[in-house]
C-alpha cells in the first residue's frame, strides 16, 4: 500500500513537471515572434471582423466578473457600453472578484457568437433561483445585455492568458 | 475470499487518503448549494454613507480618494467613471462604491474572502488549471472506488445482501425522485 502511494505521488510529480513544461511551451509557442500590439476594447471592435478566430491581445478595465465562479469577465473600453466578454477557460481558470476595476491584458482568440451555446446572458444567473444580486450587479447585467442586443454582431474572447497591469 | 481482503485493505487505506477531499467537496458543496442565498466565496460588507464631493460629477481622482479616506482609511482607490445612470462608480481594492454625485449619498460594497471556504470552493470548481483538473479526476475515481468497495466489506446479516441493499436503494431513490420531478 505504501509502495502504491509512493508510486502514485511520484507519477503525479512527474506528470506535474511534464505538464508545467508543456504549459510553458504552449505559452511560448503561442507568443508571436513579434510582440503583438495590445488593442483597447474600442480598437478591437473597430477591426473585429478581420480578427475573428485569430489570437489577439486586448486591454481593458474589468467592469464585471461573473459571480458564479468567475468563469468570465467583461472588459470595458472608453465607456461601459463598449464591453467584451472574456471566457477564462481552462488556461486562465477563473477571474476573481478582486479584479473588478483592474486593468487586464488578455491574450485570447476572438470569437463571434453564432450559437445559443456561445451566447451568454448575464441576467440569467439570478433567474434560476431566489437570486439575491446586488443592485450594482443587476445594473452591470443590464448594461451588458443592452450592449449585446444593440450590437449587430456579438463577439467574445476565449482567454488564453491574463495579466494584471 | 482474497478479493474481499484486498478490497478491505484498499477501502481502508484509500478511505484515509480521500477523507480530506471528501470534506472539501462536502463542505464546499453545501456552500455552493446556497449560492443564491449568499455569496459562497466572499463576505460582503455594505456601507451606506453621505459624502460631500466638491467636484460633484466632475470629481477628480484625488477628491474621490480624499472622500474614500474619510469613509474608511483602509480603502484603496483604483479608478472611477460616470455610468449610464449618471452615478459615480468607483472601483476600489476588493470592492466598489456607487455615489450619487448630486446628493453625495452612496453605497460601498467591500468584499472579503471567506477564509478556507474560498480555497475549498476553488478546488471544488476545478478552476486551478489543467493539473488540478486531472488530479481531482483521480481523487473522484478513488472516492467512487471507496464507495463501491464499501458495499462488499461486510458479510452476514448486516452485509449488502441482507441489510445494505435497502439503504443503498434508498440512497439512489431519493435523488432519483428529485431528478424525475424536476428535470
Image (cartoon, rainbow, N blue to C red):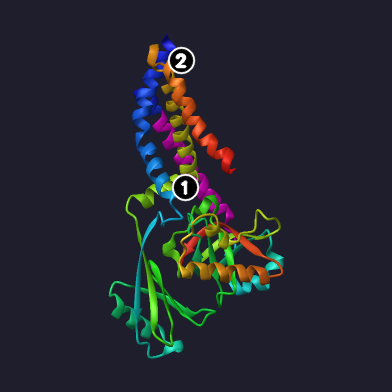
Find numbered disc 2 in the image and state the secondary structure of the residue it sits on.
helix
Q: Using the rendered image of the protein, determine whether residue A25 is visible from the camera's viewpoint.
A: yes
Q: Residue furthest bottom?
A: B54
Q: Residue at x 57, y 67 (%)?
A: A58
Circle nearer the N terminus (2, 1): 1
Q: What residue sits right under mark 2 in the picture? A: B161
Marked residue chain, label 2: B
Residue B125, disc? 1
Residue A116 horizontal/vertical position (percent): 68, 55
Number of numbered discs overlaid on the protein picture: 2
Residue B42 image point, x, y percent: 38, 58
Q: Classify residue B63 as left or right of residue A148.
A: left
Q: Which residues are magenta?
A: A8-33
- Residue A38 appears anywhere in the view: no
Residue lying furthest top in this view? Answer: B1
Label 1: which secondary element:
helix
* Nearer to us in this view, B20 or A59: B20
Marks 2 and 1 sit apart, C-alpha to C-alpha, by 36 Å
In this rendering, the answer to whether B68 lies above or below B156 is: below
Q: Is residue A30 magenta?
A: yes
Residue in the foreground of this view, choosing between B23 and B92 = B23
Question: Majority secondary structure of the magenta segment?
Answer: helix
* Label 2: few (<14), some (14–19) or many (≥20) C-alpha neighbours in 10 Å: some
Name the quadrant containing residue A44. Answer: bottom right
Q: Position of residue B52 (x, y in %)?
A: 35, 87
Residue at left 37%, top 85%? B63
Place of residue A74 in the rendered image (x, y in percent of width and height, measured from the top left): 54, 65
Amino acid at each position: 500500500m505504501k509502495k502504491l502511494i509512493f508510486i502514485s505521488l511520484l507519477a503525479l510529480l512527474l506528470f506535474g513537471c511534464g505538464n508545467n513544461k508543456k504549459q510553458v511551451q504552449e505559452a511560448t509557442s503561442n507568443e508571436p515572434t513579434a510582440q503583438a500590439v495590445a488593442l483597447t476594447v474600442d480598437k478591437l471592435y473597430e477591426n473585429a471582423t478581420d480578427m475573428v478566430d485569430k489570437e489577439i491581445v486586448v486591454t481593458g478595465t474589468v467592469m464585471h466578473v461573473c459571480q458564479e465562479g468567475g468563469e468570465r469577465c467583461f472588459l470595458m473600453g472608453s465607456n461601459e457600453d463598449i464591453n467584451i466578454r472574456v471566457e477564462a477557460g481552462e488556461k486562465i481558470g477563473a477571474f476573481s472578484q478582486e479584479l473588478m476595476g483592474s486593468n487586464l491584458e488578455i491574450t485570447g482568440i476572438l470569437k463571434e457568437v453564432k450559437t445559443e451555446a456561445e451566447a451568454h446572458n448575464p441576467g440569467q444567473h439570478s433567474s434560476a433561483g431566489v437570486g439575491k444580486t446586488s443592485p450594482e450587479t443587476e445594473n452591470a447585467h443590464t448594461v451588458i445585455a443592452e450592449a449585446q442586443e444593440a450590437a449587430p454582431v456579438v463577439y467574445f474572447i476565449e482567454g488564453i492568458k491574463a495579466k494584471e497591469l | 475470499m482474497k478479493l474481499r481482503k484486498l478490497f478491505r485493505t484498499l477501502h481502508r487505506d484509500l478511505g484515509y487518503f480521500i477523507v480530506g477531499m471528501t470534506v472539501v467537496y462536502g463542505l464546499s458543496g453545501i456552500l455552493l448549494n446556497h449560492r443564491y442565498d449568499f455569496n459562497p466565496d466572499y463576505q460582503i460588507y455594505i456601507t451606506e454613507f453621505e459624502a460631500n464631493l466638491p467636484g460633484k460629477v466632475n470629481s477628480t481622482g484625488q477628491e474621490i480618494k480624499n472622500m474614500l479616506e474619510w469613509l474608511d482609511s483602509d480603502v484603496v482607490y483604483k479608478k472611477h467613471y460616470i455610468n449610464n445612470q449618471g452615478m459615480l462608480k468607483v472601483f476600489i481594492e476588493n470592492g466598489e462604491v456607487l455615489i450619487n454625485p448630486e446628493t453625495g449619498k452612496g453605497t460601498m460594497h467591500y468584499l472579503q474572502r471567506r477564509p478556507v471556504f474560498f480555497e475549498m470552493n476553488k478546488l471544488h470548481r476545478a478552476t486551478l488549471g489543467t493539473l488540478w483538473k486531472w488530479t481531482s479526476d483521480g481523487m473522484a475515481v478513488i472516492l467512487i472506488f471507496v464507495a463501491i468497495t464499501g458495499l462488499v466489506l461486510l458479510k452476514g446479516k448486516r452485509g449488502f445482501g441482507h441489510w445494505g441493499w435497502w439503504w443503498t436503494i434508498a440512497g439512489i431513490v431519493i435523488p432519483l425522485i428529485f431528478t424525475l420531478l424536476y428535470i
